[in-house]
Structure formats: C-alpha cells, structure tokens
Image: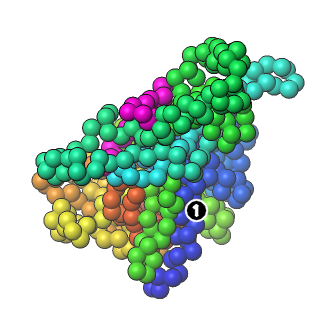
Amino acid sequence: ADIKQFIPFAEEACKYLSASPDPYHAVQNSATKLESNGYVQLSKRNPFTDTVQPGGKYYYTVNKTALVAFAVGPNYKAGNGFKIIGGHTDSPNLKVKPRSKKNGSGCVMLGVECYGGGMWHTWFDRDLGISGRVLVRSTNSDSGKETIEQKFLKIDDPIARVSTLCIHLQSADERRAFAVNKENHLSPILGTQQILENAVEEQLTGNIGGEEDQTKVKVEEEEKDFWKKEQEPLLLKLIASKLGIDVKDIADFELNLFDTQPAALGGIQSEFLYSGRLDNLATCFVSTEALIAHSNSECFETDGDVSMICLFDHEEVGSTSAQGAGSPLIAEAVGRVTTALSGGESNHDIRAACVRKSFFLSIDQAHAVHPNYAAKHESNHAPQMNKGVVIKSNANQRYTTNGITGFIVREIVRKAGITPMQEFCVRNDCPCGSTIGPIVASQTGIRTIDAGMPQLSMHSCREVMGIVDLTNGLDLFCAFFKHFRDIDDALEG
C-alpha cells in the first residue's frame, strides 16, 4: 500500500498528541471529539436510568483523568454483552511537588517528583513546558458563595530545562554510567535567582525598589495562604496570566512537565510518528476514533450490544486509584448501564449473563523489535513497526491472552480481512511487563486479551511508532465492534 494514504490519519494523531500533554487534556480532547459526534455527557452523581436508552451515545469522566464512553446498540436487550476497549491516559513524567519552590547555586528551580518508570536520562536537555489542572477560587454571582473551579493549563513556552553536566566535569566512570540520581539531578531550572527576585519585587510593588509598606502588605496577604508561600511567585504569576485570573485566586494545582516539541511524522517516507506519550495516548486516540466510526456506521443500526471504551488513569504506577483499572470503574460502568437499560431494576442474574457475553480488549503499546538490539526479542515473537497490531502472551499471566481470547481476536481479523496480528512473547531469560488486562480480568471476570500497537523507545521522553499501525489499530477496533457478537455466538461454551 502507498504510505501516503496513511498520512492524513497520522496527522490527526499528531494534533491529538501535541494537544494532550497530560491526562486532563487527553480526556478533554477525547470528550470534545465525542460531543461533536453526538455523544451526551452523563453525570456520575445522577442515576443513568431514564437517560440511557438503546441507540443512545454517552460518556462521562472520573477525576477528569479517566473516560468512559459508550454507544448502546438499537437492538439491545437486557442481559446483552459489552464490547470494551481499554487503554490508559497517563505516561511517565516529572510532576511538580506540593512545595514547588526550590533554588540552588544562584538558580531558581522547580521541585519535581518522578511519576512512573520513565527513562529519565531522556528528559535531560529538553525544552520543557508545564501543564495540568489548576483550582481557582471565584464567587458565585447569584449566591455570593465561594466556588472552586477546575481549569486546565498548558504552557507551551519552554520555561524549564533539566541540563546535563558537561563532559569536562565528569570522571570516565561517570561518563560511562550516566547514572541519574532522581532527587538531585532532575530538578529543572526556571531562571537565575537575581533576575527572578527583581521580577518578584516588581510584581509586588509595581516597580523595583518601590515603597516598602506596599510590599509588606502584599507579602502579608500571601503569607495567609500557607500553600502559596511554598510556590515560586513568578510561576504563579505566569499561571494566572495564562488563565486570565488573579494570582490570589489560585487555590492549588496539579502540574507536570512535558517536552514542548510537537508530535511529528518522520522517516525517509514519513512512515514514523515521533512523539511523547505514545504509550498510551496512541490507544486513546485510535479507540475514540473507532467508537465514533462504529456508532456512525450502518452496522450499528443492527447492533444489540453496548460498545464501550474505558481510558484509565494511573496505569504507569500500578492502577490502584479511584480512576485506575484497579478501581470499580469497569464493573460500575457495566452495572449502571445494565441497570439503566433494565428500567432501573438491578438483577444480579442478568448482570452475570451480561458479563459472560462481554469481552475486553486491553490495549497498551507493544515492544517492536529494535534492529540494534534484536537479540532482546525471542526470534519467533519479534513484532515489527508498520506490520500490524500485536497480541501479547505470557503463560505466567502477566498478560491475559489465552487460547479462547486469542482465537476470538484472530478470528475477527480473519473475518474482517484486515492486516494479520503479530505475536509477542517475552524471552525466558527476560522479565515481562504487565498492563491493565490482568487487573480488569480479575476484578470483573470479563474475558480479556492484551494487545497493542508496536513502538520503540517506550517510556522515553520521545517515542516512535509506525503510522500504518494507527490505521491497523483503527481497523482492528472497528472490526471488533462489528464482528465480535457473531464470532462469540458461534463459539461453543
């Protein structure tokens, strides 16, 4: 196939990736796309009964970092199954500590904490921006009561940098090892202390060397907020400027750093996608597109199941949170939607039948074989980029794939006539990673398979995958929504 036909979809993926430096923006961007295609937002605080109906399209978020979206087949009957694609919105990064103010050797720095298992040496000498969620105080115009609003922040300017130590100041052993002390070596530099202190004084007084009384009053106001005292004043000013608010209205924040270099196509034929956070925002992007495509297709009109995507947070740190795969999120989604479609009646027997008719595609990026390190892969299970989605297998249940779930997905591919699946099985002398599949399977009892689009440089600040595999993923997800029921019904037992 001509590589050019895959470029438009890959360019859309680049836009999504560049606009999604953190889970908040990833969920927001997916939700915006869903809403533009007729999906209605639900509130988790209100019953779904009388709202969720056959033929309807809905979504809701959890903590604004996890997303559940689903389309109810017009032919849905009580006890029918769920076809679910799962991924995760988080990626390894540097998160701003609760007390972010830090300085050393004449430099103003930022206190950060390592999130997940990042390849931290790749974060050195990168132009870093800051993004995340900011809690903002405001006053309700009707009641006069204080309210707390959640605003999302994305500062694309390269305001921070983690610099390497020059080669001349390193011993031979240090150069060979390039060992990173995560506490001492990863603090980004925001600026030089003298210049920033002058800017802070100007911020407080309106001019450098202004009246002391005015400075004292403003400093005393700031000290009433013990949280704000521990934050870099010019960072607060920049946040306020970006959000169009006053510094005094900033109540708290959850921020992380990101590489400001946008996602881009690369390779001699533009056959690669270079970006941060491909693990696992590539899945978030493609699964959202697939759900929309299915719910807008002719085959949806005869669908009797619920087609769903669940994008979790905190996979990179074990999934044990209120919005991670270890939470009740999936079980609750299945239970609430099933109850709503049963007229509000909660029937354990109907729900159990529904679970037995359901299937979960656990999709997380897969390890493509690296041509410089080919010996790290078992030769018969060495997936390549641009060659198809990868089924992950592990007899020790680090992945959930078994004979039945593997057959179902391979049969879907065969029936749809799309690119065959590749296979990955780790070498016996190499450790095996894991993902959300085993967690969801053990929490819900839903049959599960682990799979993913292949990539290199996983957990690097900047990763790479083949653009053809974005389309391969889309084809697989659409085929899953279309063909799963027929194949599952034909399967004995």
> Image quadrant for the C terminus?
bottom left
Span colored in magenta? 95-121
Disc 1 crowd rating (10 Å Cα; few below 14, some 14-19, many 20+) is few
Examine the rendered structure and indicate whether residue 238 appears above or below residue 135: below
Q: Nearer the viewer, residue 12 or 55?
A: 12
- Direction bottom: furthest residue: 2
Which residue is at a point 47% across and 82% down the rendered structure image? 3
Please tell me how many numbered marks the rendered image carries: 1
Q: Hey, which quadrant is residue 237 in on the image?
A: top right
- Predominant secondary structure in magenta? strand
Residue 115 falls within the magenta-colored stretch: yes
> Image quadrant for the N terminus?
bottom left
Residue 249 falls within the magenta-colored stretch: no
- Direction front: furthest residue: 209
Examine the rendered structure and indicate whether residue 383 appears above or below residue 437: below
Amino acid type indicated by mark 1 = Lys
Residue to which mark 1 is pinned: 15
Determine the secondary structure under disc 1: helix
Image position, residue 208 (x, y; %): 65, 30
Q: Nearer the viewer, residue 298 or 349?
A: 298
Q: Nearer the viewer, residue 288 or 117?
A: 117
Image position, residue 76 (x, y; %): 63, 53
Q: In this orientation, does residue 373 appear?
A: yes
